[in-house]
Each structure stands twice: as C-alpha cells, then as structure tokens.
Image: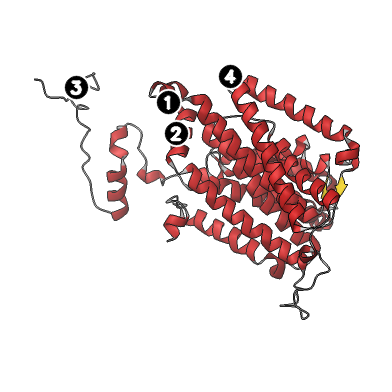
Amino acid sequence: MLDRLLSHDRPRSRLLTALLLVCFFGLLAAPFLFPGSKPLSVAAKMLVFIVLVVSYDLLLGYTGIVSFAHTMFFGIGAYGVAIASSRLGPEWSSLALGVGGALGVSLLLSLLIGLFSLRVKAIFFAMITLAVASAFVTLVSQLSDFTGGEDGLNFRVPELLRPGTLLLEEPLFGVELNGRLLTYYGLFVATVLLVLAMLRIVNSPFGRVLQAIRENPFRAEAIGYRLVVYRTLSNVIAALFATLAGVLLALWLRYTGPETAMSFEIMLDILLIVVIGGMGTVYGAVVGSVLFVLAQNYLQSLMAAAQPAVAGIPLVGELLSPDRWLLWLGVLFVLSVYHFPSGIVGRLRQPPVSLRSAPGRPRWASGPAVRQAGEQGSPVQPHPPEGAAAGLGRPGAGRPRS
C-alpha cells in the first residue's frame, strides 16, 4: 500500500526515511508541539515552499529546463484568490472562481511560453522567461485599481477559515481549535496530496521520458520523442503546481503583493532549495524546503542567543553578530554544496563506498548482483558481460557468428 502510494519511489536510505518522517510528523503536529503565531507561520511557509520547489524541480531537476518565470505563476495563483475574494466577497464560490481563473491564466501563459520559447537553447529560454516575469511584475505594479499596485491586496476568507471562528469552545492540548488551525491543516493536506501527485508524475512513463530528454535530448529525439511537446507539458504542469502553491500562500496570509509572491528573491530561494535538497528528487524538495525555511527564520535568533557567550572575544563577537545572519546563511549554503554536491537526498541515496566500484575494478563488477551479494556477506565472483573479455567492447564482440 505504502509502495503504491509513493509510486514505487522509496527513499532507499534509512537516514533519509528518518529525516522525511521527522519532517512529516513535525509539520503534522507543529501547532501542538510549537504553539504560537510565529512557529505556525514558519510551518505554513514550509508547506507552501515544498509545493513550489517540487514544481520547479520538475523543470530543472527532471527536464533540465532553467526558468526564471516560476514566481510569475506563483503570483498568479495568489492574485487570483485575492482579486476574486476582494471583488466578489469572502465566499467559497468566489474562492473557487479565483482558483479556477488563476489555473486557466497559468495554463495559457505556460503553454504560450513553452511552444514559442522552448525551441531555443537553454540560456536563451532562461533569458526569455526572465524578461516575461519582469514585464509581468511591472504590469501588476501599475494596475493599481485592479491589483492594489505596490501595496497589494488585503482580503477576507470564508468565515470557517477566519481566526475568530472557534470550532470547539475548549482548547485541545492548550491550542484553540479555530479557523486559523483549520487553514493550516488544509495547507498540510493539500501539500501532501500535491507531493504524492508529483511522485506519480515523475515515476510515470511521461516522467521517464523527461529524464531521458534531460540526459540526452538528441538521442531522445532520435528514438521518436518530440522534445518541444514534452518540454511544454512539463512547463505547463510545473506552472499549475506553482499556481496552487500561490493559492495556499494567499489563503494563509490573506494578503497578496508583488514582494510577497513575485519578487526575484523568492526565485533565488527556490534555486537554493533545489540545489541543497538535490535536483531530480521530490524528496529533496521536501527536505531542502524545511531546512532552508528553518534556517531563514531561526538562524538570527540562534545567533542572538549565542551572542552573550562570545561578546568578550575580539572579532568573534563581531562575526557572530545577529545582524550578520545572512553572511552565515551563505556560508552554510556553500558548505552544503561542497559536502553534498548532489544535494542532501542525492548524497543519502548513494550506496556505501564498499559496494561501489573500487579503483581498477571494471564497472561491470559493481552491478546489482554484486551489491546484493555484498549486502548478504557472501563472496561473489562477478562475470564480465557478454563480449567484454574478448574483443574489449568491439562492435559485434561476443555475438555468435553465422
């Protein structure tokens, strides 16, 4: 059951499994384990970024497409909910209309960008998406009567999701069961469902084709796959997921603005999280989002707590000043890239050194059979593949002659 739920994509590492379980149950019980408005907001931001980074990883990690327009679709989702709710009132129908309209606009824009831009080389596509995203942000800022301009839009959500709505009169484990808590668990359920849906997509035949295009586009095209079609579909799916992430953000904040949902800083954060977690891994987006948002929100507080202990030490006290938390966040990023070049999940999924091919050992001697025998502790005498001993890989070596 669990294997089918994960689309047969198990973590394949005990440490990674433990890390994912900590993330899952930590976010599930966050309102009760860490009461307060800030911890709850940080946990909600983690959920939003998990969906957003998972969608971008489909582009960058699985298809090999670099796009700078991802926050544009993120902002479309947030503005769709905000505009519909502020114009039509805080009703479920207006909320549904805003989500549907945002998905429709994202579908159209991503389809146009994919069909007209994905025929060019990667660097030119990245520049095109950057120009489109910049133009869209400028357009949103100038349409102040419709989008609120630089000030953004405040809106009300349906009554059931408001903080003043009490679901139970008595607190549960010291936590009030109100509309705010219901909104958080709505975000949690939506995030879990979207991550499972992305796992199904990347492990489907469609996802395998995307990985083939990433590894060798010329060979993928030679065997009959139309690159523009598959890349465009990948762009559309990623845009729709990013739009839903924007919807989740708007529902939580009850506010949308250019800096909140469409700034270039968010795009940089997405890139950092993908690299830290591991490109081409859905689990990397989950782990990377949790660690990055945690460091982004609590590193400064941690340095402030440690400041009195090092205040008397020259230079060290200045370096560990809470005002320099961004410097140390950059240092942590550099160290993570240095020690985890394939990302945290990529490193944890690597087989032990003893089971890899040793120097001077042929690559065919480190296959699945050899690894399985090594795990069972039994000696193994690997045989070379057919044609490897005679002919040293000549074309046609090892085949019987007629």
Give how far across and how far down residue 294 sits, in percent: 70, 53
Name the residue at 79% across, 46% down: 325
Q: Which residue is mark 4?
A: 121
Name the kind of residue labelled 2 in the image: Val
Mark in the foreground, 2 or 3: 2
Q: Of helix, strand and loop, which one carries label 4?
A: loop
Q: Say whether disc 2 or disc 3 marks the residue closer to the N-terminus.
A: 2
Q: Are marks 4 and 3 in contact (CB under 8 Å)?
A: no
Q: Work out how far the residue at label 2 is from the one at label 4, CA to CA, in angstroms.
A: 19 Å
Give how far across and how far down residue 60 sits, in percent: 58, 34
Name the residue at 68% across, 37% down: 106
Q: Which residue is mark 1?
A: 220
Q: Which residue is mark 3?
A: 397
Q: Residue furthest bottom?
A: 170
Q: Which residue is mark 2?
A: 209
Name the kind of residue labelled 4 in the image: Lys
Q: Say whether disc 2 or disc 1 marks the residue closer to the N-terminus.
A: 2
The answer to whether residue 335 shows anywhere in this view is: no
Q: Of helix, strand and loop, which one carries label 3?
A: loop
Name the kind of residue labelled 1 in the image: Ala
Q: Quadrant of residue 232?
A: top right
Q: Say whether disc 4 or disc 3 marks the residue closer to the N-terminus.
A: 4
Q: Quadrant of residue 114?
A: top right
* In this picture, residue 156 sits left or right of residue 385: right
Q: Work out how far the residue at label 2 is from the one at label 3, CA to CA, in angstroms.
A: 30 Å
Q: Residues within 10 Å of mark 1 (few under 14, many from 20)?
A: some
Q: Split into 4 quadrants, where in the image is the N terminus?
A: bottom left
The answer to whether residue 51 shows anywhere in this view is: yes
Give how far across and how far down residue 271 sits, in percent: 66, 37
Q: Are marks 3 and 1 in contact (CB under 8 Å)?
A: no
Give how far across and how far down residue 395 sits, in percent: 23, 18
